Amino acid sequence: MSVRSELIVAASPPARRTASHASWADRQSVFSWLMMAPPLLFLGALVGYPFCYGILLSLQDRPVAHPGTFVGLKNFAANFNDPIFWRVALNTFVYTGAATLLKMVGGLALALAMNQRFPLKNLVRALLLLPFIVPTVLSTVAWMWILDPAFSVLNWVLVLVGVPKPGPSWLGNPILAMVSIIVINTWRGLPFYGITLLAGLQTVPPELYEAATIDGASGWQRFRYVTLPLLQPIILIVTLFSVIFTFADFQLVYVLTHGGPQNATQLFATYAFDIAMGAGQLGLGASVALTMLPALALLIVALTIYLRRG
């Protein structure tokens, strides 16, 4: 309101002044809803509708190009009686837990190193973003060549240091395949952790470190009692984002291993896609995809309680 409007309202009777304030509050409320309407409609169209339709599909026996038949919770019961489903669940939790832990530790170490003064620091920070900028499919194809059993750069290096030919089949061995996708996911996620934690480190007042040094604190004690407590909210946020993105990862695993060998790298997202699109069972695939929701919710709640218990 302008100064003139405020003077007019102040000079007006109390009843008129109350009505004027109520009218102004109503206009603010309408304006707020108008501003929120586009994102709400966007979320409803691209998130709400597919989610509700997925719930409907999960309760049906719905082959491709055929009408669905309501079967209730039969699809979920079939998943729980499927040994492959439980292997997929174990793979997903191992993949998510290992990759998130490696990204958190590696990203924090990277942020601490990047927070130091050294030549060409800005250039190194820009190069740090490359794994995050390169499209997932493109970088995964490059990793396929790196891990190829016949043309693998890693195997070539191992042969040079004395490992007999042929080198290990990185994507043909169940354990090595899981290790490979965890390492690649960590490589892609390190920039997100590193840059975010670096931004948090630069907000820590230098006076706190100076005071801790005067009190006789060692480097480890300054890190433990000054740096970590101040970074804890940022660590919580980036860890939650990492858990969500890693738990629902699809492109990297599907392009690199297609869930193999012997379902050793099959995750919830890839398994749901194979059932729905490969086998043509849309209802069963939707039930597998929806199983991710309570599992992910429990994982996020447990992680939040653990990180905030102090």
Image (spheres, grey):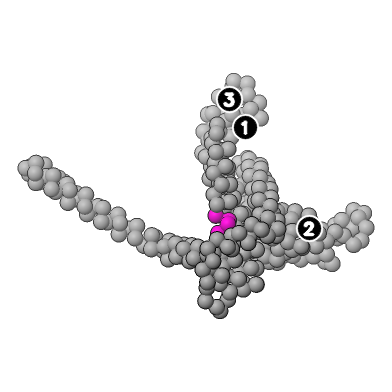
Tell me the chief SS of the magenta region: helix
The earlier-in-sequence mark between 3 and 1 is: 3
Which quadrant of the structure image shows residue 215?
top right
Assess whether residue 95 is covered by the magenta stretch. Answer: no
Residue at 68%, 52% (x, y): give it.
90
Of circles 3 and 1, the one toward us is: 1
Local packing at callout 1 (Cα closer than 10 Å; few below 14, some 14-19, many 20+) is some
Camera-nearest label, 2 or 3: 2
Left or right of 178: which side holds 240? left
144 relative position to 69: left or right: right
Q: Quadrant of the C terminus?
A: top right
Residue at 60 percent across and 71 percent down: it is 281
From mark 3 to mark 1, how far is it between C-alphas? 10 Å
Front residue of 158/282: it is 282
Q: In what element is the residue under mark 2?
A: helix
Which residue corresponds to mark 1?
Answer: 223
The percent coordinates of residue 60 (x first, y second) are 53, 68
